[in-house]
Amino acid sequence: MAKDGNEQGSGKIGINTRLAHSGNNPHDYFGFVNPPVVHASTVLFRNAAAMADRNQKYTYGTRGTPTTDALAHAIDALEGSAGTIVVPSGLAAVTIPLLAFVSAGDHLLIVDTVYHPTRNFADTMLKRLGVEVEYYAPGVGAGMAALIRPNTKVVFTESPASNTFEVQDIPAIAKAAHAAGAIVMMDNTWATPLYFRPLDHGVDISIHAATKYPAGHSDVLLGTVSANESHWKQLYESFCTLGCCAGPDDVYQVLRGLRTMGVRLEHHQRSALAIASWLEGQKGVARVLHPALPSHPDHGLWKRDFCGSSGIFSIVLAGGGQKEQHAFLDALRIFGLGYSWGGYESLAVPVWLGDRVVAKAPYEGPLIRLQIGLEDVDDLKADILRGLAAVTA
């Protein structure tokens, strides 16, 4: 067994092997396969001199424990990052790095198709703190250079986009941002580091809602933020300053889920692609918004940069409005109506795009986002047909 995440990061072993063994050396803990769950606030020092110098690995529970280190090292092995912080939710994984790197008077560029709670945080708290927030179209690519100002500090990306699944040209955006001295952050929750490694494509800070695929069972909230060498120190110091640390039991649950994420993602991917392809031929469906489909406008970009796809995409109904959208959702029996995704169960939610300012492309009808879980594909197809029949009725 490999000893830790750094050894795993060499890329010499397969992804499922890395997932199974990263972040833990059983022989550090008497041979037990899983690391212990350390519940800690107070940490004792050997003597007064050690306390004054803080010259020991752990000093207080908010700054890390063997449990949080196990998960952080495993994520570093997947991301190729210099360090990872573990925080209580996916939204905290967005807000903490933004607070770490933007200040009053800074200009922040955010993709207009971003996760709504990210937008809400930027439009409320960051603006109140004096940060200038501007939204850009997901297809900007190298055109990002024209949007950057002398005070642009961060370019925030999310690819594919929330709900509409546009793919951003991350290498081109990173090149333009770095030429102007700006930092690039990316919410990579959709692909996970198994199917896209942001730091390999020029991103400085990689963000994940570990609530989703790493945890995988719809029962825990967690987020991770990974940084390259240049930005790790500032990220970690800000994390310690904010004191926004995750509980050990939640960390353990995600570490446990991580071990099977590869096989679960493969199943999600296979089922989602089968259903998405099938939906393209169904009456009542105007469009399927899945970047791994050849029909998607950004399929070439996705194929160039990604090595897989996950289980979430959207469909556009062929006409109608909220009434038809709700009829589809209310007819479902297997798909649950609930937010989040990445768990074992299939989910469906109505999509609302009223918050966008530049990415306002018209759609033929209302949108519905589908999370394809681990159920049998034929059963999920039958459920979707119930929804489509309710729309026409």
Image (tube, helix red, strand yellow):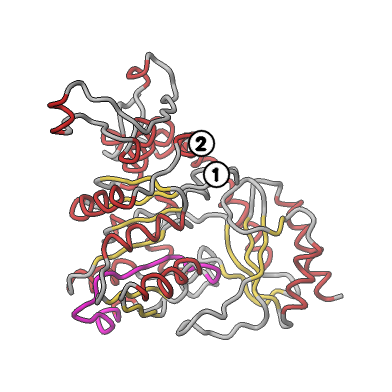
Quadrant (top left/top right/bottom left/bottom right) for the C terminus: bottom right
* Residue annotated with mark 2: 253
Q: Residue at x 66, y 69 (%)?
A: 350
Residue furthest to the right: 393
Name the residue nearer the viewer: 126 or 12. Answer: 126
Q: Are marks 1 and 2 in contact (CB under 8 Å)?
A: yes
Circle 1 SS class:
loop
Q: Residue at x 41, y 25 (%)?
A: 35
Name the residue nearer the viewer: 226 or 250. Answer: 250
Above or below for 208 versus 247 = below
The magenta stretch spans which residues?
Answer: 143-164
Hey, what amino acid is under mark 1?
Val
Q: Picture coordinates of residue 81 (x, y %)?
A: 27, 47
Relative to residue 368, is residue 123 drawn left or right? Answer: left
- The answer to whether residue 144 is magenta is yes
* Residue annotated with mark 1: 220
Above or below for 374 versus 133 = above
Above or below for 387 versus 146 = above
Q: Picture coordinates of residue 384 (x, y %)?
A: 75, 62
Name the residue nearer the viewer: 288 or 329. Answer: 329
Q: Residue at x 66, y 64 (%)?
A: 349
Local packing at callout 2 (Cα closer than 10 Å; few below 14, some 14-19, many 20+) is: many
Circle 2 SS class:
helix
**Which badge, 1 or 2, is on the more N-terminal residue?**
1
Quadrant (top left/top right/bottom left/bottom right) for the N terminus: top left
